[in-house]
Amino acid sequence: MLARDVLKILDAGAASFSRLSPARISRVVSYSRNIFIPLTNACRNACAYCGFRSEKPYLMQEEEVLRLLRAGAELRCREALFTFGERPEVYPEIERALAKMGYASVVEYLYHLCERALKLGLLPHSNPGVVGYEELRSLREVNASMGLMLENASERLCGRGMPHEHSPGKRPRERLRMIASAGKLRIPFTTGLLIGIGETSKEIAESLLALKRLSDRYGHIQEVIIQNFKPKKGTPMEHSPEPSLFRILKVVRAAAELFREQGVQVPPNLNQRTYAIFLLHGANDLGGVSPLTKDYINPEDAWPREREMRLLVEEMGLTLRQRLPIYPEYVKKGWYSERVGEVISQTATRDGYARE
Ligand code: SF4
């Protein structure tokens, strides 16, 4: 598919959109029951839409993390999702807190917590922001999959007055480099775009195609998230408009055309009343949904209950299925370390999803 074909979808009006050939409708809609662990809200970046980062940052202590992991294991969560600000050590108080626990970096601390998660039978999926090749290599040993949103491949969005002006870690080149490194290391990977932060259709098309090229080259991209921007109070983009439903619909459609073998995910908590529509236009995954923890990045948007999701998906004649953070294809291909493999095997024996 060429850029002009993607653009044709992104710029379609109602009439031309309705003339597109029918979208794929996946018989199975997947989601991952997880426990969300926001290790720290310190971040070296300052994205104009972020309501998560704080100038008075915290770092979760090991006991606090363990409490969540144990509670998650009891609720039969299969994924421990570690999501936090990028390179938080730039804050001296975080650096000191890490040093007090005996860690030189947040990645070292994360490694240790992932080991604890594995011992409790949970599969870690870490979103550590931009990290180096060797850090990724070490995290692979204790993660079933990892993730980094590309957000957008446009350097323009990092320019003066733009949402990523003060976010060195959001430079597309940096992000694409890390996604490529994950491919070289055979890490099943989740990435995606953030829609509605001032990007053009052409920039969305180029971003999707940049991910597609990496996916074709390394075969490691297991899912692409299409996330809609939601304004947060007290941020520079507080009064920016949200993207329209039709806009998101077209991006989902374009992603589904490009990523036919992969998951296309829409977060159901950010699209409570509309996610069924995306399932009719190529989306086939609802991402991580937690029975215990909130979405700390979007705390005002509660996860739907699994029962509600199931009722809706079944009403559509589809099947809702819990999955692991690593997609079944990568389990079959053996893209995991020995330690992660042990937990996958235990889980497969217990539940039967991993090897389907
Ligand atoms: S990288 Fe993430 S946590 Fe950091 S400022 Fe941007 S949106 Fe917030």
Image: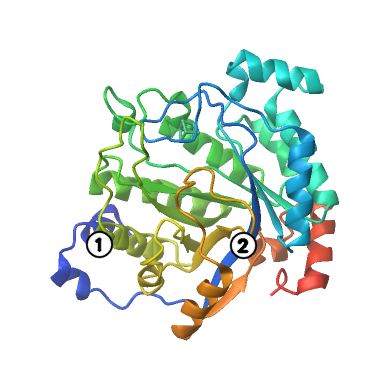
Is residue 142 in view?
Answer: no
Q: Amino acid at mark 2?
A: Ser
Task: Give coordinates of residue 15: x percent, y percent.
Answer: 14, 72
Label 1 crowd bin: few (<14), some (14–19), many (20+), radius 10 Å: some
Residue placed at 50% from the left, 43% from the top?
297
Is residue 253 in view?
Answer: yes
Q: Amino acid at mark 1?
A: Phe
Residues 293 and 4: in front is 293
Quadrant where the C terminus sits is bottom right
Residues 3 and 66: in front is 66
Residues 268 and 293: in front is 293
Q: Is residue 175 left or right of residue 239?
A: right
The label shown at residue 294 is: none
Quadrant where the N terminus sits is bottom left
The label shown at residue 32 is: 2
Answer with mark 1 or mark 2, whichever residue precedes in sequence.
2
Helix or strand or loop: what does disc 1 sit on?
A: helix
Residue placed at 37% from the left, 41% from the top?
152
Tell me how far mark 1 sits from mark 2, CA to CA. Answer: 26 Å
Task: Give coordinates of residue 164: x percent, y percent.
Answer: 37, 29
Quarter where residue 84 is shown? top right
Task: Give coordinates of residue 105: x percent, y percent.
Answer: 70, 23
Residue placed at 25% from the left, 56% from the top?
244
Q: Is residue 343 left or right of residue 88?
A: right
Residue under label 1: 246
Count of numbered circles in the view: 2
Helix or strand or loop: what does disc 2 sit on?
A: strand
